[in-house]
Image: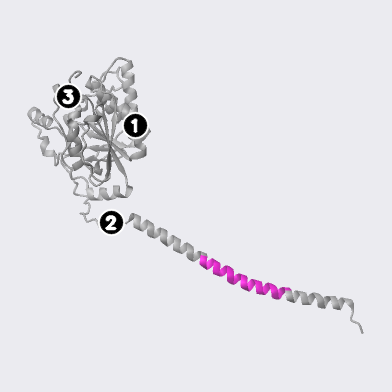
């Protein structure tokens, strides 16, 4: 007897449902195994990558050698005889206030190149060989340095041997008859070349006079966003006696009741960006003064001090970094003040200027 049609349909669909469930079970089993294996593989790759990254960072940050140095002591300051901190918390750098090994290690990790600008115009070219030779001995030893020499006589630039990682570039610029003009054009050229070239080649700029002699190590302890150097002639002098520009007609004007320190124009610097801002502002003030037919009493140094009054340096170098034996002797004769006792090492010696030799009229 024939089965009812609905029974046949139920048997048919039951068989297909069982087959479908079996197929789904097989696929699920294999799929889980596949994706689980792939997931483990992916996690292993990520773990290896993360461990590799951590290892690379560890190797990058790990000092090449162990540094051994005394632990800083709260109740034992490094120097008691001199000012070591300004009122705006900028350190004042004296010998004995820093550990050069620690600083060298920090700057080594930065992998920074330092630029040193110097202007040798007219008869100031006579100082250039001594400047470069002493800088090769004492300036930023062990670090990369680019010398930037600005001169109106490129053929007089001495060819001295340079250590590895140190280069020299010579720029030919006009030389003016008056030394004041040669001094003041420096700000314009530093500003211009900072935007055109320096920012591509160096991280810091150190701007120095040429008539100086490096006599002791001058290293990365001087570097900061913006640094300036104390003028020995006005060390421990009341601010109303500073040689600021006191005429209100000048852009360099500073009232007698304002001022922190008097800074020398012989040595300043910082990051390329900060030096550019300083030089550009000083140049603009000089141009404005010229239009008003006035010249600041200390030329570009007056404008430098005006800028630094309202744009505080982040680090201040002591007079060890621009020392004058004649000025120190004058202090002793005039006030019985022994400045020599404060100086542990003369870092840079300001050579006694022979004004009849280098500050004369046209050759």
Q: Can residue 237 be seen?
A: no
Q: 159 or 347: which is nearer to us? A: 159
Residue drawn at the location 25% of the way across and 30% of the way down:
154
Separation of marks 3 and 2 at Cα, in angstroms: 47 Å
Q: Are marks 3 and 1 in contact (CB under 8 Å)?
A: no
Please identify, in this view, whether the residue under mark 2 or under mark 1 is nearer the observer.
1
Residue at left offset 58%, top offset 72%: 33
Give residue 64's mark. Answer: 2
Q: Position of residue 37 (x, y in %)?
A: 55, 70
Looking at the image, which is closer to me, 236 or 319? 319
Colouring of the image: one colour
User: Residue drawn at (83%, 76%), measured in percent from left and top?
Assistant: 10
Q: Is 89 displayed left or right of 352 in the figure?
A: right
Q: CA distance from mark 3 to mark 1?
A: 26 Å
C-alpha span from label 2 to label 1: 36 Å
Badge 3 marks a residue whose secondary structure is helix
Dominant secondary-structure state across the stretch colored magenta: helix
Question: The N terminus lies in which quarter of the figure?
Answer: bottom right
Tag 2's secondary structure? loop
Residue extent of the magenta highlight:
20-41
Lower position in the chain sequence, tag 3 or tag 2: 2
The picture quadrant where one finds residue 359 is top left
Q: Which residue is mark 1?
A: 193
Tell me if label 2 and label 1 are in contact, CB under 8 Å. Answer: no
Residue beneath label 3, please?
358
Q: Nearer the viewer, mark 3 or mark 2?
A: 3
Q: Residues within 10 Å of mark 1 (few under 14, many from 20)?
A: few
Residue 88 percent across, percent down from the top left:
29, 37
Residue 20 image point, x, y percent: 73, 73
């Amino acid at each position: 007897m024939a089965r009812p049609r609905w029974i046949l349909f139920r048997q048919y669909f039951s068989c297909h449902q069982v087959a479908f469930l079996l197929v789904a079970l097989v696929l699920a089993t294999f799929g889980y195994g596949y994706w689980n294996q792939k997931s483990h593989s992916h996690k292993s790759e990520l773990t290896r990558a993360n461990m590799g990254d951590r290892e690379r960072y560890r190797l990058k940050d790990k000092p090449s050698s162990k540094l051994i140095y005394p632990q800083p002591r709260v109740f034992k300051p490094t120097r008691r005889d001199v000012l070591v901190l300004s009122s705006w918390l900028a350190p004042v750098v004296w010998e004995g206030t820093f550990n050069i090994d620690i600083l060298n290690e920090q700057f080594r990790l930065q992998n920074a190149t330092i630029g040193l600008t110097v202007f040798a115009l007219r008869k100031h070219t006579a100082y250039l060989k001594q400047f470069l030779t002493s800088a090769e001995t004492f300036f930023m030893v062990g670090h990369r340095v680019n010398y930037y020499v600005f001169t109106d006589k490129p053929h007089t630039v001495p060819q001295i041997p340079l250590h590895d990682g140190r280069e020299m570039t010579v720029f030919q610029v006009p030389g003016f008859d008056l030394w004041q003009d040669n001094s003041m054009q420096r700000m314009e050229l530093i500003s211009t070349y900072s935007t055109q070239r320096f920012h591509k080649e160096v991280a810091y700029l150190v701007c120095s006079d040429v008539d100086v002699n490096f006599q002791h190590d001058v290293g990365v302890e001087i570097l900061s966003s913006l640094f300036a150097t104390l003028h020995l002639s006005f060390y421990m002098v009341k601010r109303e006696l500073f040689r600021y520009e006191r005429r209100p007609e000048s852009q360099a004007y500073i009232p007698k009741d304002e001022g922190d320190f008097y800074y020398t124009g012989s040595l300043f610097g910082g990051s390329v960006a900060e030096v550019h801002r300083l030089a550009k502002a000083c140049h603009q003030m000089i141009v404005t003064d010229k239009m008003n037919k006035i010249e600041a009493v200390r030329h570009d140094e007056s404008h430098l001090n005006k800028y630094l009054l309202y744009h505080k340096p982040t680090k201040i170098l002591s007079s060890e970094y621009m020392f004058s034996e004649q000025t120190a002797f004058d202090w002793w004769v005039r006030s019985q003040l022994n400045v020599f006792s404060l100086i542990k090492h003369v870092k840079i010696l300001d050579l006694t200027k022979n004004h009849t030799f280098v500050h004369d009229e046209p050759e």
